[in-house]
Amino acid sequence: MVSGITRRKQPGRAKVVAVLGLVVVSVAVWFVAGWFRNEEVPADVADKTASLFLEDIRHDRVDAAWSGTTAEFKSFMGKDRLRQFVRTHSVLKEPTEFLEFQMISINGLPLAECTFRSSIGASTIHVLLANEAGQWKVERLLVD
C-alpha cells in the first residue's frame, strides 16, 4: 500500500456538472412552456363551453355559470359582482349568435376567444376560455 497519494480534485468538473444541470433544466422548461403555449381547444368545444355559460347567465342560473369559470375569474369577479355585471349589461339577457372563434395569447397564457353578437342589439360579447386542470373554463367575460 502506498501512502501519501491523494486524489486531486479537478476544479473544472464542478463547473461542467453545473452547466449540464442548467442545460437540462432549461430544456425541460422550454419543453413545458412550448407544450402549454401550443395548447388549443377544438372550436366546437370552445363554442359549446362559451354558449352554455351565456345560456346559464341569460336564464338567471348564475351559480351554474359560476361553476364553469376558472379560479382566476372567481378571484377577479365574485358571484355578487358577476350578478351586478349581468344586471348592468342587459345584452347578456338577450339571445346571442356565435360569430367566431380564435386562439389568442395574453401574457403567454393561451386563451380561446369566442365572439358572439346579441340578436337584438349591436353589442358584441367576448368569452375567453383558459385551460384549468385539463378543462376549458371561462376566464373572462367582456361586452362591447
Image (spheres, grey):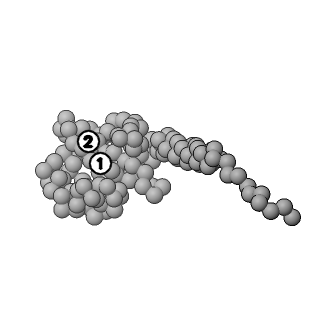
Residue positioned 24% across, 55% down in the render: 76
Establish if 71 lies above or below 140: below
Q: Is 110 in front, or is 112?
A: 110
Which residue bears the numbered disc 2?
125
Judge the density around disc 2: few (<14), some (14-19), many (≥20) Cα neighbours within 10 Å: many
Three-letter code, disc 1: Arg
Which tag is nearer the camera, tag 1 or tag 2?
Answer: 1
- First along the sequence among labels 1 and 2: 2
Residue positioned 23% across, 56% down in the render: 77
| Residue 123 position in % (x across, y down) | 20, 38
Residue 104 in view here: yes
Q: Is 66 in front, or is 31?
A: 31
Residue 42 in view here: no
| Residue sticking out furthest to the left | 88
| Residue 140 position in % (x across, y down) | 29, 48
Give the Cα distance between marks 1 and 2: 11 Å
Q: Secondary structure at mark 2?
A: strand
Three-letter code, disc 2: Ile
Query: In the visual, does 27 lie left or right of 44?
Result: right
Judge the density around disc 1: few (<14), some (14-19), many (≥20) Cα neighbours within 10 Å: some
Q: Is 41 in front, or is 108?
A: 108
| Residue 50 position in % (x across, y down) | 35, 48
Which residue bears the numbered disc 1?
140
| Residue 100 position in % (x across, y down) | 36, 35
Cβ–Cβ under 8 Å for marks 1 and 2: no
Establish if 124 lies above or below 49: above
Query: In the visual, does 17 lie left or right of 115?
Result: right
> Where's the C terminus, which quadrant?
top left
> Where's the N terminus, which quadrant?
bottom right
